[in-house]
Amino acid sequence: MGLDIDLDKIPPHLLQEEDPIFAFAKAIIDATHKYSVAYKPNLAFFESYGVQGLNAFKKVINFINKVTKDKNEFDEVKAKMCVKNCDFTKLKNLENQEGFEESITKKNSKEKQITFANGANRGGVLGTEIVLPENYSPNDQEEFMNDNQLEFFRQKLLNWKSELLEEAMDTKDNLSSEGLQRPDISDRAQVETNASIQLRTRDRERKLISKIDSALRRIDLKTYGYCEETGEPIGLKRLMARPVATLSIEAQEKHERDEKIFIED
């Protein structure tokens, strides 16, 4: 169960609570903990609301731990039902028969993209794992965006995301340890300034994490590495420098020129 808190979508009556972010998350947990196998609070959403959001995140984690601790035994029946309903073959059959809302069409042929046929196994046998050669690095002599290249960039993006999330947790710990209750006005002002800088940095990184997640989805769909406007390869050199790139250099330059013309007009 994902906990992605957005104040713009919280029911109005919860906005009257002392801590609406925590109140909303708690309401979801209260309503679902009997049926949910696990919870996934999205830190990026919480930290976008600054110190208030980080404090709410800590309260949510404590509340989840309390709810989990109150469960005296593992619900084996519920766990088996969850696994059964998430069976890969079952989901793939549903995709083939009905399609899902998140399915997209291929840029050139306009055919429906089969989401589950391009998951972690890259269209191979279920459970197959791609092992990259030692010290592997993509090169222009091999087929563009072959399985090895896709796996290389998937790992690169996941490592980048992991580093960003670790930095976000460090920021939360720093803000919690420093606090804002300083007797000296100049000290308090310095702490507030530092906190503001750290939170602005985290907000930029939150947006970057969203781009990383989008890039990972494109890898699963095997559309990664191709310009969203022209359909042409973005190029390995550009992807190595910016793995979340969605436009080729030419398309990006045209986009920037058009923006400049619009601003000048």
Image: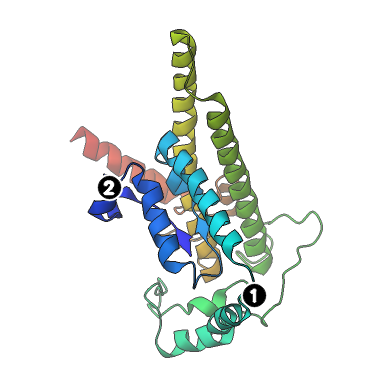
Separation (CA) of disc 1 from disc 2: 43 Å
Q: Quadrant of the C terminus?
A: top left
Judging by the rendered image, the residue that carries numbered circle 2 is: 15
Percent position of residue 188, x then y: 46, 15
Q: Nearer the viewer, residue 3 or 137?
A: 3
Percent position of residue 192, x then y: 45, 21
For this orientation, the residue located farthest to the left is: 265
Which amino acid type is shown beneath numbered disc 1? Asn
Front disc: 1 or 2? 2
Q: Secondary structure at mark 1?
A: loop
In the rendered image, the vertical position of residue 148 relative to residue 167, given as above or below: below
Q: Give the number of callouts.
A: 2
Q: Determine the residue positioned at 64% across, 67% down.
A: 143
Disc 2 residue crowd, few under 14, some 14–19, many 20+, Cα 10 Å: some
Is 128 left or right of 215, judged from the image as shown? right
Residue 260's image quarter?
top left
Judging by the rendered image, the residue that carries numbered circle 1 is: 121
Q: Nearer the viewer, residue 51 or 138?
A: 51
Residue 85 is tagged as none
Is 48 left or right of 259, judged from the image as shown? right
Residue 127's image quarter?
bottom right
Q: Is residue 207 visible?
A: no
Please tell me which of labels 1 and 2 falls first in the chain.
Answer: 2
Q: Determine the residue positioned at 59% across, 82% down.
A: 77
Q: Determine the residue positioned at 64% across, 75% down.
A: 121
Percent position of residue 11, x then y: 26, 56
Q: Secondary structure at mark 2?
A: helix
Percent position of residue 178, x then y: 55, 24
Which amino acid type is shown beneath numbered disc 2? Leu
Q: Determine the residue positioned at 51% across, 64% down.
A: 217
